[in-house]
Amino acid sequence: MAKRAPIEKKRPEYGSDVIVDLMKAHEIEYAAFNPGATFRGIHDSIVNYGGNYMPEVIFCFHEEISVAVAHGYAKAKGKPMMSIVHNIVGLQHASMAIFNAWCDRVPVIVLGGTGPMDTTRRRPRIDWIHTALVQGNQVRDYVKWDDQPYTLASVPESFIRGYRIATTEPMAPVYINYDADLQEDALTGAFELPDVTRYEPPAPMQGNPEAMKRAAKLLVDAKAPLIIADMYGRKPEAMKSLVELAELLAIPVVDKGNRMNFPNNHPLDVTDGARELLEKADVILALDVIDLYGSLTRVNRTTRVSEYVTGNAKIIHITLADMLVRSWCSDYQVLQAIDVPIAADSSVAVPELTRLCRELLGSKKGGVDARMGEIKKRHDDLRSKWQAEARGKADSQVVSTAFLAYEIGEAIKKHDWVLVNGSANGWARKLWNFTKPRQHLGTSGGAGLGYGMGAAIGAALALKDSGTLAVDIQADGDFLMTSSALWTAAKHRIPLLIVMHNNQSFYNSEEHGIQIAKFRKRPVENAGIGTHVDDPAVDYSNVARGFGVHAEGPISKPSEVRPAIERALKIVQEKKLPALVDVISEPR
C-alpha cells in the first residue's frame, strides 16, 4: 500500500472498467471484499484495468468484515470507501454490518453483483439461486438508497447519485447492484464520464432564524443550562465550535460518545455522573442526540420501566434525524417532547447560535463566571478520584478494567493516538485525555456484535502513513464474531495496537442473567451458563499468531500488563504491523 503515482489513463473496454473509472473520479482509495463470481468483472477491472490503485483491494474473509472495514475507515477519514459483496449470499452476510452502518449514520458505499438477469446466460443452478428479482429489497429498510442500473448508460448517474446521497447529511449507507452482463459485456463505442465535481453534496442546512433566536434567548436566560451532544462531532471543526459555545455561557456538556464531541479534560465536561445536573437543568440543548428520551430518563433494567430524571427543563434539539426515518426498525427511538426543535446541520448551527448568544449576553456575564468555577471543581474532583481508583488496583491479584485502561493510557500517552474502537467500559474516557477531533471514533458502532475488529482495521487503514497510532480495546465476545479480520490486518500490513479486554464472558448477557435471577429470587451462580467463554478458554494470542499477527498473552497479572503493551507497541510503531495483547481481566 505504498504511495505511488496514478497509472496512465486508459480507455474503458468493458462495463466494469467504467465502474472503476467512477471510483477513481470520486477518489475512492480502497475496496474491501471477499471475492465472488458475480462481481468478477469489477474485480478484474480494479486489479488489471485500474492497476489496483484507487481503489486498492483490501482482501477480507467475510462480507461482514469488509463492510465494517469501510465503516471504520469512513469514521476515521471523513470520506467513504467501497465494500463489494457477492450477490444474495454475500449481501446476507453483509447485512448485519450494513445495519450497523445505518444505525451509526455512516456513509458506507456497498456495491454488489448479480445475475445475469438475462436467464438465457445463467449457469445451471448456482446463477439461479444466487440471483434475486430485486436484490436491493434485502437491505432497503436500512440503507438510505439502493439502485440496480439496467444499462451501462445508466451507470454513471446511478453511481454519482449514490455517492451524493450517502455523503449528504444525514449520512447513511447506500447499496448499488450491477448485473454480471452489464459488468462483463464489451463497450461498443467511446464512453465519457460526466464531470463529477458538478454533482457534489449540497451545502449544509442552517437553522430557521427565528427558532435559532429563541434558542439563544433560552440559553442566555438560563440559570442551569446543560448541553447533551451525541452524533454532533462528525466533522473535525465541530468540537471547537462546541467548546466556544460552552465557554461563552459556562454550560456543562454531557458527551454521549457516539462521536468525539467535547474534550474530556475540559472543566465543563460532565459526561460521567451528570444526574444531579440533569435534575437541576432548566434549559437543555441537545445536539444530534439519537435517543433523547433515554438521555433524560433512567431505566430499571429488570422491569424495563423508565422515569424522567429532568424536571421542567425547556428542551432545544438541533438535528436532521427526522429526515432519515424507516418504519422497519424503531431506531428513531421514543418521540420526545421538544420546546424548540431545529432542523439543521449542527456543525453550522452551533457557530450561529454562539454568535446570537454573544449578542444577548450583555451584563449577565457575572453569573456565567460563578457557574464556571463550580462546574470546574466538580470536574477536577471526579477526574482525580478516577485516577486514584485506577492506580489503586495495581496491587490486586487480578487485572481490573480500570487498571487495564490506565496501563494502556500510560503506554501510549507520549504518542499521537486515536482510540478507534472500544472504551474499557468507559474507563478510557475517564482516565485518558481526549482533546482532538476524532480522537475517539465512538462507543457503539451500531447495533450488534462483530463490528469492532473490522472497524478498527478500517480506521487504522485510514490513519496509515499519518504517523497516528491506532488503538483498539477489543471486547472478546465481539472479536469472536469476526476473528478472521486479523488476517486482513496482517495481509495488508496495517499498523494497529489491539488490546484484548478478555473477561471470558459475554458479560452484558451475564449481567442481565444476574439481574433477572435476583428479581426472581433464583441462583445468580447460574448466570454464567451460556455466557462464560471457558472450558475451554480461547487463547487469543494463538488465534492471532495463526493469522500472522504478533501476539502476547494471555496475561493475568497486573504487573505484566504494561510491559506487554509496550512490546506490542514497538512492533506497531517500528515495523508498521498489527500486534495483539491478550489481557484476562475482571468484567468491569
Image: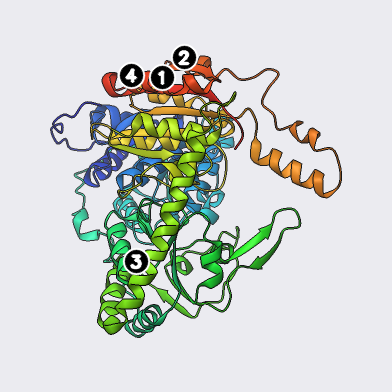
Frontmost residue, 553 versus 165: 553
- The answer to whether the residue labelled 3 contacts the one labelled 1, judged by CB atoms less than 8 Å apart, is no
Callouts 2 and 3 close, C-beta under 8 Å: no
Query: Which is in the foreground here, disc 2 or disc 3?
Result: 3
Mark toward the start of the polypeptide (3 vs 1):
3
- Spatial separation of the CA atoms under disc 4 and disc 3: 41 Å
Q: CA distance from mark 3 to mark 1?
A: 40 Å
Q: Which residue is mark 2?
A: 545
Residues 378 and 38: in front is 378
Q: Which residue is mark 4?
A: 571
Which label's residue is closer to the chain start, 4 or 3? 3
- The answer to which of 47 and 381 lies nearer the viewer is 381
Asked whether residue 453 is in view, the answer is: no
Q: Which label was assigned to residue 563?
A: 1
User: Horizontal placement of 247 versus 451: left or right?
Assistant: left
Q: Is residue 372 above or below residue 78?
A: below
Nearest-to-viewer mark from 1 and 4: 1
Q: Which mark is residue 453?
A: none
- Mark 2 or mark 4: whose residue is earlier in sequence: 2
